[in-house]
Amino acid sequence: MPKSPIFTSSLNNPNMKRLILITALLFIVSCQQKSKMDPNINPFFQEWNTAYEVPPFLDIKDVHYMPAYEQGMKENLEEIDAIVNNPEAPTFANTIEELERTGKLLSKVGRVFSNLASSNTNPKLQELQRELSPMLSAHYDKISLNEGLFNRVDAIWQNRENLDLTKEQAKLLNDTRKGFVRSGALLSEDQKERISEINSKISGLTTSFGQNLLAETNGFELILESSDLEGLSDGVIAAAADAASQKMDAAESDEEKDKYKDKYVFTPHRSSMYPFLTESTRRDLREKLYNSYVMRGDNNNDTDNKKTAAQIAKLRAERAQIMGYKTHAHFILDDNMLKSPEEVYDLLNKLWKPAVKRAKVEVADMQAVADAEGYDFKVAAWDWWHYSEKVRKEKYDLDESAIKPYLSLDNVLQGVFNTTNKLWGLNFTEIFDIDLYHPDARIWEVTDKDGSHLGIFIGDYFTRSNKRGGAWMSSFKGQSNLDGRERPIVVNVCNFPAPVGDDPALLSFDNVVTLFHEFGHAMHGTLTDVKYGSMAGTSGPRDFIELPSQLLEHWASEPQVLKSFATHYETGDPIPDELIEKLLNASKFNQGFINTEYLAASLLDMDWHTISANDELKDANKFESESMKKVGLIGEIAPRYRTTYFAHIFSGGYSSGYYSYVHAAVLDSDAFEAFKEAGDVFDPVLSSKLRSSIYSMGSTDEAMDLFVEFRGRKPIIEPLLKVRGLDGSE
């Protein structure tokens, strides 16, 4: 099947692989010999005359970060002083717009450092994270708590009715003032000082939490003999053998090399763990690997996260109280679409009862299979993947291993590129002469339907030990139209299984959905077209910005989309209609588990962040146990994230916001229903409206208004219940 013109390369052909490898090696040598950067000057202090201003990764060394950060903070404060000390009366132009222009060097180094510290870290970067965390917290407090700066912003805001501001400018003014107030601008000096202390402590603790989690995830290996591989498919065995081989190659002593010789390695990384839990017939080993995952951060060692999480929650509660809010959740939600903990709990509880009810049915189905096999045990959490797969095969005659050969990474990328081409006319051309931060990463230019440059997209898809878990979107450069047209450089980072041997990387359908999800974020960051950078892309409320990502997921399972890219990596045959039908028939399978584990984590997040500042420091395990017992979580399911590895809320930006995925699911299910009602999932009128109302708007309008602009009304929950099979129809 010929490749689409919007996807200009394939790695499935061995000759193409060799050509690309040779080209890459030649380019690395070329870059080393012909770098445009002066090697005697810190790269962050030079103009990046690279193609599309992609960071010159080969020239950036670990030693360059701290000097660049220090200079960036110094320049940033000087820029703030210039605004504060401007003798002219405060205006939107000389205060609000000038604020938008500040901190360019700090942003330049910060985007590179934060991205690499997550996706390609090393001990030096981790040391720098720990050192920089309190420094940056203190720096931003100096700005957000600057009384003179706030007074200028407030004066403009007080006079807003007399200013001839555009809608975008009025929103920026309001958001800017609100940001200062939410940072403590109206507090007393003593309160401001305490807020700064708390911010610094939280910053350090969240950094420690993330680094501890990475160490815990990398700290366990299930090393097996060939006799331990019962039930595993050839592909899973080959991946485990390859993992052991890589460990052996990296070993520094003969003793360590012998540890991995002729062995097979599995780890708590999901790309390694899930296939093992699904296929292995060794229940004892499934239990061991599963427990290594759910006990991360809960091992009473130097990387234990129990006390760290409890301290973060308590400090957040104290900060919220100082700010005049009942709890941290009240503080966070004041800036979201859902405005109170009560609204969030109400949403979660609407889904909780039908989800748990369905999960109990799923347990019964799995127990019946185990009983029929003659086993005398009660199905446990570590059995779920193994027996749910057997139930799926029995009920739907669907085998995950039958789907994967059609879902090579290149095929799926072609599929998501095709989808956005049909929706918005976008085109993607892979670039091979730009150096990136890791050989796994790939880069494309994104052009609009008229051929104009829209942005740069970087994809980094494979699991590695120096990359944190999960999947995410970020950027190396933002979008702005304030001082000329600045287009973004966005990046998707995932943790998919790497290719083994000469075969391409083969994805599960869950991996495909994840790729479409993160690409939806990437499109939100690429299609953004606003004047002010702080309002661009994914800058909106947490419970709205998952809408563009989750909405794109719906196209992944559309038959016409699947047929456009799912071809067998060996034969080139398209995916059979029969297999697509089985996949769709099974789409609501295991939704009890999927929804229950997610909702449990969301409820746990809310419980942690509705504690009072006056409460004693919590025992994390006891708190979590009571939280889950209160709602009736069944023993066969653990929260998707237990407290000690809940990075979203304890080292990411989702505190009191993990519910956002289900709130956005209400929005995305209802939004996609509009395409279904139109009878065409690529309806041109709706596609154009989706881009102009949602993907291009950033946070230039209220989130609900943006949704209503697209849908014509506020969202309803019924489409979500239908999509997830929680409406009683199954």
Image: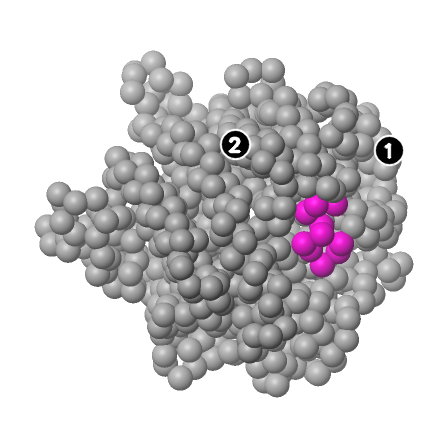
Image position of 188 with respect to 589: above or below: above
Q: Does dot 2 land on a helix, a strand or a loop?
A: helix
State the extent of the magenta-drawn residues as a range: 328-339
Q: Earlier in the sequence, mark 1 or mark 2?
A: 2
Disc 2: CA contacts within 10 A as few (<14), some (14-19) or many (>=20): some
Q: Quick check: is 446 in the magenta stretch?
A: no
- Residue 571 seen by the camera: no
Disc 1: CA contacts within 10 A as few (<14), some (14-19) or many (>=20): few
Estimate the spatial distance between the alpha carbons at disc 1 and disc 2, rounded to whole Å.
34 Å
The disc labelled 2 sits on which kind of residue?
A: Ser
Q: Residue at x 33, y 51 (%)?
A: 105
Q: Find residue 395 and report its horizontal and vertical position in percent.
A: 77, 53
Quadrant, the C terminus: bottom right
Please name whichever residue, 444 or 243, is drawn nearer the observer in this view of the structure: 444
Q: Residue at x 56, y 61 (%)?
A: 155
Q: Residue at x 62, y 50 (%)?
A: 181
- Number of the label disc, if any, that sits on residue 630: 1
Q: Quadrant of residue 701?
A: bottom right
Please name whichever residue, 206 or 202, is drawn nearer the observer in this view of the structure: 202
In this rendering, the label closer to the viewer, 1 or 2: 2
- Residue beneath disc 2: 200
Task: Give left or right: position of 656 versus 27.
Answer: right
